[in-house]
Amino acid sequence: MNEYVSLSHGSGGRQSRDLIKKVFTERFGIAEPLTDSAIIDESFPPGSRVVITTDAYVVDPLFFPGGDIGKLAVTGTINDIAVSGARIVAIAVSFIIEEGFPVNDLVKIAESMALEAERAGTRLVSGDTKVVGKGKCDRLFITTTGTGFLLPQHEHISSGLKVTEGDRLIINGPVGNHAIAVLGARNDLSFKTEVLSDCRSLNRLTEKIVDNCGEIHFMRDLTRGGLAAVLNELKEMAKCIITIDEDSVPVDEPVRGLCEVLGFDPFSLANEGKLIVVAGKNEFRKVLEIMRSDPAGFDSSVIGEIVAGDRPAVILNTSAGGKRIIELPSGLQLPRIC
Amino acid sequence: MKYISEYRDKELIDRVARQIEMAVERDYTFMEVCGGHTAAIRRFGIPSLLPANIKLISGPGCPVCVTSTGFVDRIVTCAQMDDVIITTFGDLMRVPGSGPNLEEIKSKGADVRIVFSGLDALDIALQNPRKRVVFPGIGFETTAPGTAVTIIEAAAGEAGNFFVLSAHKVMPPVMRALLENGIRIDGFICPGHVATITGYSAFEFIPYEYNKACVITGFEPLDLLQAILMLVNQVNSNRPSLETEYKRAVLPEGNSLALEVLSKVFEPCDAEWRGFGIIPLSGLALRREYEKHDAGRLLKADFPRGKDNPACICGDILRGLKTPSECPLFSETCTPANPVGACMVSAEGACNSFYKYTLYE
């Protein structure tokens, strides 16, 4: 096999088939013969509905401390399904590869995808590769599409319809690590950090939460735009006032320090393994306990509350004892972070 | 985070806030001239800790905000020349000019790259010897020494393809211009970082010549509250003076190394400020010894002055005459996602800070 991907690998002929077989299908456990669609051998529980999500990944660099583009493409799609309160069943993936991309790197990325899917208990069932000429894309872009099913009692979770006064907001750990890890891995910044990306699948955590608690009113993962973006989306959807205590939001020390130096707001930084759970006032302690018992939620903490009022807003009680609004982040934050 | 957390101690903050509450006797208006202060005041929610009769207004201390339309036009013109790479701090990308801004021409193919320091820009010049690399020098006494060092290195390394378009400015003349215009304030929260470079003496004219209170301070909530308390006490006793709360960073004589490179590379020049027009001797131009690195040479001598959007009141905001919420464009037409004026572009701009961190009322 060539050491580098060439345009002939995208021609649909012998080289394409060799590449697909040697790099992808065996690792993903996709059996011959290769069909045009994957037929999923899974029957959904009666009354459940099908969910589907898709996401493109263009992160730069492709490999960063704590993950790589492949792991990110799998966890990102799993998490979109998971925080809807749904259960992931299968993932389809498409690769756009720039001519000249090292096959070894492609193998590493495929391995990382297969490993992450296995960890999360799901499968990569269908795929596509395209090769484009030098300079027509930046090394490698990946798109993943996930599907799963949603039980009727969890349908409200993604829209926040049941969010009400007295609900508590719980986060599963410190914010900002992914963005700082990726920035640190880029050559254009003159700092090195020990910070690892928080990139991980959250489906086992969310399944534990929704299977054991009845008052889960909202869940969402914190990706681009970070905590600030999700809180503002929730405010709009649920037409509520959210108060957050700055001191209770976990931020790792190196992340906090770099934010001070670089002028970033940790609440607006991207994460890839963090979520917000909004739980009813009678149940949030139990939810917190369940979350803390899961490896993806050891550092969970209650960070705020839904309060009464008629003008939707996100209010931060600052660590200095003051109050201010948390606005939706806007403009170019940090490009190509996922 | 030691050395920072002490200045965010809630109990101490609360104690100083109560001292301020007990000290106030009348209405007070103080201006912070540093954009870093503007952002810190909003970020920590300082106004919510103050009695209602203390008003804080933002001055012309955000370097991006005071950058003139004409300067943006110049740098955009450079970017459209053959074989030119623009290397800029990210904030400048979206600052409006008379025509397109840097972000717009980048999307149409101009080679515009974001850097984090002048030395990064010089590296790009060294790696691309056939291109001309232009670095827009923006900022006050705090960033100008970095540009000066870069120019010295470029000259020593014979990077003849490295150019600086200087819009560097110095702070004291614009504070004098505000006072000459009869600005109605009781005192200044003086810029702590600028003072670390210049030393105390740069601000002494304020109490002596204009009888206004003056405190140099840092950027943590306790710094800001302590400075406000000191200002209130100066006003109450009717003894305006120059005090510094930021002794842990500011030396009376400033940073002699930085001052040395500044005067080696730059000389004072008249400069255009958004909202103020030309202020005499408020800018920094490259000295003749370094003129081969002056990007002004790439442009016509009679390059036209820029035109500002007439509806935008950035000028009045920078002069402390109006607050962002008094602008008809604020938060409707002009938002961080779609800025009309420069004050909405930079994270340190009064409008941007006000938009992001407005106190909940």
Image (cartoon, helix red, strand yellow):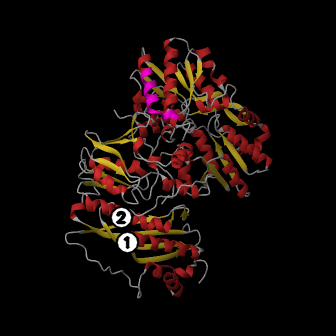
Viewer-closest of B200 and B129: B200
Q: State the separation of the CA atoms marked 1 and 2.
A: 9 Å
Determine the main secondary structure of the stretch shown in magenta: helix
Q: Residue furthest left?
A: A47
**Which quadrant would the C terminus of chain B be assigned to in this image?**
top left
Q: How crowded is mark 2: few (under 14 residues within 10 Å), some or many (20 or more)?
A: many
Residue at label 2? A203
Rendered view: A296 above or below A122: above
Q: Which residue lies furthest to the top in this view?
A: B238
Please tell me which residue is depicted at 31% across the width and 70% down the height of the picture. Answer: A148
Which chain letter matches label 2?
A
Q: Residues within 10 Å of mark 1 (few under 14, many from 20)?
A: few
Rendered view: A110 above or below B126: below
Task: Give, as a single range, the part of the protein colored magenta.
Answer: B6-19
Residue at label 1? A121
Viewer-closest of A240 and A112: A112
Q: Does the CB distance between marks 1 and 2 fall below 8 Å?
A: yes
Judge from the rendering whether residue A100 lies leftward or rightward of residue B287; answer left or right: left
Please tell me which residue is depicted at 61% across the width and 79% down the height of the picture. Answer: A3
Q: Is residue B112 visible?
A: yes
Rendered view: B241 above or below A155: above
* Residue B12 sits inside the magenta stretch: yes
Please tell me which residue is depicted at 64% across the width and 31% down the height of the picture. Answer: B196
